[in-house]
Amino acid sequence: MGLGFDIAHMLAGLMVLASFLLLYQDRLPALINVLRLHGFILALAVAWQAYIQSAPHLYIAAVIALAVKALVIPGALDRIVDRLGIHREVETVGGIGPTMLAGMALVALSLRVMLPITAHADPVSRQDIALALSVVLIGLLIMVTRRNAVGQVAGFLSLENGIDLAAAGARGMPLVVELSVAFSVLIAFIVIGIFLFRIRERFDTVDLAALESFRGERQ
Amino acid sequence: MIVALLAGTALLLVLALAGAVARGQGPRLYAAAAIVTALSAVLALASLASAPATLTLPLGLPWLGWHFRLDPLSAFFLFVVDLGAASASLFAIGYGRHEEEPGRVLPFFPLFLAALQLVVLADDAFSFLFSWELMSLASWALVLVHHRDRESIRAGYVYLLMAVLSGFALLLCFGLLAGGAGAYGFAAMRLAHPAPGLAALALLLALLGTGAKAGLVPVHAWLPLAHPAAPSHVSALMSGVMTKVAVYAFLRIAFDLLPVPPGWIGLIVLALGGITAVLGVLYALMQHDLKRLLAYHTVENIGIIFIGIGLAMVFRAAAGEEAAAALALTASLFHVFNHSVFKSLLFFGAGSVDVATGTRDMERQGGLIHRMPRTGFFFLIGCAAISALPPLNGFVSEWLTFQAILLGPGLPEWGPKILIPVDGALLALAAALAAACFVKAFGVTFLGRPRSAAASAAEEADRFSLGAMGVLAALCCLAGIFPAVVINALAPTARTLVGAAMPTQSFFHAFVPWGAIIPVAAARSSYDGFAIFLLLVAVTGLAIGAARRLAAHAVRRAPAWDCGFPDPRPETQYTATSFAEPIRRVFGPAVFGAASAVRMPAPGSLSPARIRSALRDRLWEIFYAPVAGVVERLATSADRLQFLTIRRYLFFVFAALVALLLALALTQ
């Protein structure tokens, strides 16, 4: 308890806040910047967990999070947006008000579900897991409400950040799990990046509506 | 005893493996299967009256094990199974040579036999259902032997669907019987006392599950498709034996595992049995494919068996009617044995005819009695037995069923009082129509003149096939002439199920020196197969003697009477369709939705007039087509899910997750 708990709680809360920021960004460069912030807060949160749990291996996880999620991936996304020339494209998010309300409902739901279940757990990881679940759910919500493929990637990455946060909060999670999760995210990112360019090559856009019409579906 | 029986089953499994590996060893495999199953039959016969024996093997579910039990009920059905299996194997030693694709039969035939034995011996729900499904799958593979034939494919498909339905119903039934604690052993189920509603539901599910395997109307539709599609020795097993295993399963659940069910379920069984008997024989009359005709007769006979079972259930539910219940049950079990014997015999005959003429269509046969006299003779005995003619076995069991029906009006409730005589009338109708049907089957196939070149060049079946038919024909006669032996042998089984047995039939009765059977009381009714047999022999002998002595000995050759037609071609003979026409006229419009139209040529035209008639399967239209339609509509609407956008798929995942979390939040 005490200060350690408060700071952990604050960092996790900041991640949820960053998720909300992601939720209503309708320009891609801004979206990527917020994603960078999201990754940065994650790295801080993991590092703080390493400190209060005195688990040195979590420092490695924090460094990986900082490198991969705050620097490499947002940088790469920036390059993609640059090369695709879609700075100015506006995402149709579908009404900021309702989306934000839905996000708040998701946070409430995850707290309502998680807090009773983890009643006997350590209070630090307890709050962490509840907030991490909200981050995951909001990530999914971002993916559902975006029409642009880059936007969906951003949603997916924030979702993954939430999983990472939960993993860091749980005591005794071996390092290898974090490593493999980070690695798989990197791979997934590479695959998605390649796909984005392929889609662009073929359809001249990364708007998913083009793919849908290509599959011959009725809208 | 049970160890020896299971060793036999294991040997059959080894034979199945050998059948998958060895090529061209068909006759040896069949011979080995015949020996193993014949020994099993002897063992089962010997243990008919012995006390229940159990055995547990460390197989199956890890905490349950694989339980086996041999009691009088399973011993009787094991005897029926092994008798049918042994005769089918013996028949197949010769018949199997004509199989075009032996590699598709040899692995599955012994597997099928082993599965049949295992079902009867199983003593827990898991091993029972496992063996049951093994039996279904092995027989399904055998139905699809001629897999390039479109009809076989359809038959296999419908069969598989109905087997799934049956397995599913039984799964639910055992689930209800096992209760919340999951006591899947039959021993635990016997001791449990489920709530009356639950027990009734379980019993109805069992009726559906076993009825779908036995061929009870309306879940019979697969049977006339699947049984003829298989090779004939397999058809004999499916019709003669597998349907009996389904009857066994129903008896096991209704009379052994569950407490005494209420009488109204017995009335349902009774009504279904009566409907099944009549509809089965009516459909059979309309067929001119010999094997399909026999398959529809299986439906009819299953109806007769279920009439007996339903009567036993009704009497068992009434107070103080144990003796009547024992009589009805014994009649039903007797008919189980009889039907397995003569239906196997008839399918062997049909298979021999099929091999000899290359067709199962009766309209292309005829006059076979000259080319295949022994097959014809055995087939005739089978026909007489299934038509319930004395002194053969079919008569005894149907007569016993009627005796039980005649006890029905003595019951106090009005339901059985009314329904049982109605069932009696249905049974009588079915018996009469069956006789007409087998006059047609035998007459068109074996009598008259050949209707095709293949029929006129047919050759007698080989000695193994004839041997198998001969043994079964002899059993038909013996069980009919000495029914007291069979009834006494069935007493332990009846006592296990209803707590009473028919009075012991003395083989040498006090008043008549041969064995008259007396179901209830001597003053009421009695039947003496041996006396009837002697009478028939005497009368026939006298008639032949008189004909020899009194008739003129000079031989006079003259043209055959040709019904007024000067054209002597074989086509002008009475056909199977024309034989069935009067009955089609009576029942056709109501039962089959029959429609026929005559097309007359224009005056002066030389083209022949044509009559075109069509039958519709009303049962298919009522029970199956709507279900198939609903399934198809559901499948079509679910098909749309395959062409959604990526975002919608993501939304489904998201919505499912949120819904589950909500459920969790609300139920905490």
Image (spheres, rainbow, N blue to C red):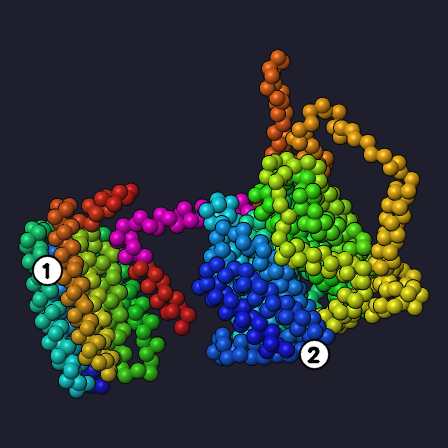
User: Where on the picture, by quarter, is residue B89?
Assistant: bottom right
Q: Which residue is mark 2?
A: B51
Left or right: B522, with A189 as reference point = right
* Residue at 30% in and 69% down: A110
Label 2 residue SS: loop
According to the image, label 1 marks what residue?
A77
The subunit letter for the residue under badge 2 reads B
The x, y position of residue B209, in whole percent, is: 58, 60
Q: Is residue B630 magenta?
A: yes
- On the image, the x and y values in percent for residue B75 come to 67, 71
Q: Which amino acid type is marked by label 2? A: Ala
Cα separation, mark 2 vs mark 1, equals: 80 Å
Residue at left 16%, top 80%?
Answer: A58
Residue B523 as seen in the image, left or right of residue B557: right
Q: Position of residue B615 (x, y in %)?
A: 61, 37
Is A80 located above or below residue B77 in the figure?
Answer: above
Asked whether the viewer can see residue B192, the reply is: no
At 22% from the left and 44% from the top, the residue drawn is: A214
For the image shown, how many numbered marks are present on the structure? 2
Quadrant in which the C terminus of chain A is drawn: top left
Q: Place residue B114 in its image quadrant.
A: bottom right
Closer to the camera: disc 2 or disc 1?
2
The answer to which of A46 and B414 lies nearer the viewer is B414
Q: x, y percentage for residue B642? A: 33, 50
| Residue shown at the point (12%, 56%) measured from the top left | A28
Farthest right residue in view: B511
Placement of A27 over or under B257, stated as above or below: above
Q: Which residues are magenta?
A: B624-652
Contact between labelled residues 1 and 2, with CB atoms less than 8 Å apart: no
